């Protein structure tokens, strides 16, 4: 469980807090947890406001995930999203770009928006990461949604386009999820959208008023699909 000041593990009866083990002089007193990931090797990765950490089972402590010095490493910036793809790669979203980390070798590849370049990620502030059942990786940012072509290592970017009803409801993306049908759902500042892979367009959904006449805010912060195929 991530909190504003560290992480806790619930054993079914009570919560066990875990504290940071660090020699870094720049470690802030507040350890805000923004994302958690349990990988296929049983390790727990923790994204915090000052970087990436691993839970060490033997000492039951959190340790900073460090690499040999690599030019442009973004792992010590604020972590905003974590995901593991089926090839074992750990994808780390930050406020300053996207990292692809090979946990076996420590190799790191950075993806950043560069104004003069084409087919790059739409914005450096990543908000959500999701892999759909076909293996395609989707990355949400504060300005646009991105579909990553692994073979070409290029991004296709999607935005809200005025009166185009097949575009996103908003270019500000907050959440991503894939359901058991393989559909990708996008939570935006203005409703939730479903990617129609046959028509290559987005279907927008806004919330209806409840029985008591009250309506939900159309800003969608998180999405989860359950085992019965229902979307929350």
Image (tube, grey):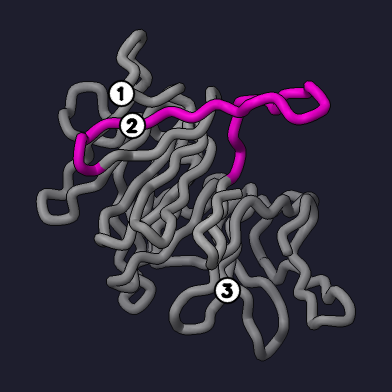
Q: Which mark is residue 202?
A: 2
Residue 13 in the magenta stretch? The answer is no
Q: Is 227 left or right of 110, judged from the image as shown?
A: right
Q: Which mark is residue 166?
A: 1
Disc 1 to disc 2, C-alpha distance: 5 Å
Query: Which residue occupies 63% across, 81% down?
Result: 56
Q: Which mark is residue 44?
A: 3
SS state under label 3? strand
Residues in magenta, as a range? 197-222
**Quadrant location of residue 78?**
top right
Query: Which residue occupies 36% across, 63% down?
Result: 101
SS state under label 1? loop
Q: Percent position (x, y) of residue 148?
A: 24, 47
Q: Nearer the viewer, mark 1 or mark 3?
A: 1
N-term mark: 2 or 3: 3
Q: Nearer the viewer, mark 2 or mark 3?
A: 2
Query: Which residue occupies 48% across, 26% down?
Result: 172
Q: Residues within 10 Å of mark 3 (few under 14, many from 20)?
A: some
């Amino acid at each position: 469980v991530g909190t504003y000041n560290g992480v806790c593990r619930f054993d079914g009866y009570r919560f066990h807090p875990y504290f940071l083990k660090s020699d870094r002089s720049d470690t802030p007193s507040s350890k805000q947890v923004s994302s958690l990931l349990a990988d296929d090797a049983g390790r727990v990765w923790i994204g915090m406001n000052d970087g990436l950490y691993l839970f060490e089972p033997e000492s039951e402590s959190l340790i900073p995930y460090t690499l040999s010095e690599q030019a442009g490493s973004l792992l010590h910036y604020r972590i905003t999203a974590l995901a593991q793809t089926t090839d074992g790669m750990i994808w780390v979203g930050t406020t300053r770009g996207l990292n692809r980390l090979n946990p076996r070798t420590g190799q790191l590849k950075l993806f950043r928006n560069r104004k003069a370049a084409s087919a790059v990620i739409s914005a450096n502030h990543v908000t959500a990461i999701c892999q759909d059942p076909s293996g395609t990786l989707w990355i949400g940012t504060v300005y646009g949604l991105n579909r990553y072509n692994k073979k070409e290592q290029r991004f296709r970017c999607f935005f809200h386009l005025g009166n185009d009803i097949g575009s996103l409801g908003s270019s500000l993306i907050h959440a991503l999820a894939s359901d058991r049908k393989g559909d990708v759902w996008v939570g935006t500042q203005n409703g939730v959208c479903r990617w129609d892979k046959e028509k290559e367009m987005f279907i927008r959904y806004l919330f209806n008023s409840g029985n008591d006449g009250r309506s939900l805010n159309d800003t969608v912060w998180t999405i989860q699909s359950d085992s019965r195929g229902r979307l929350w």
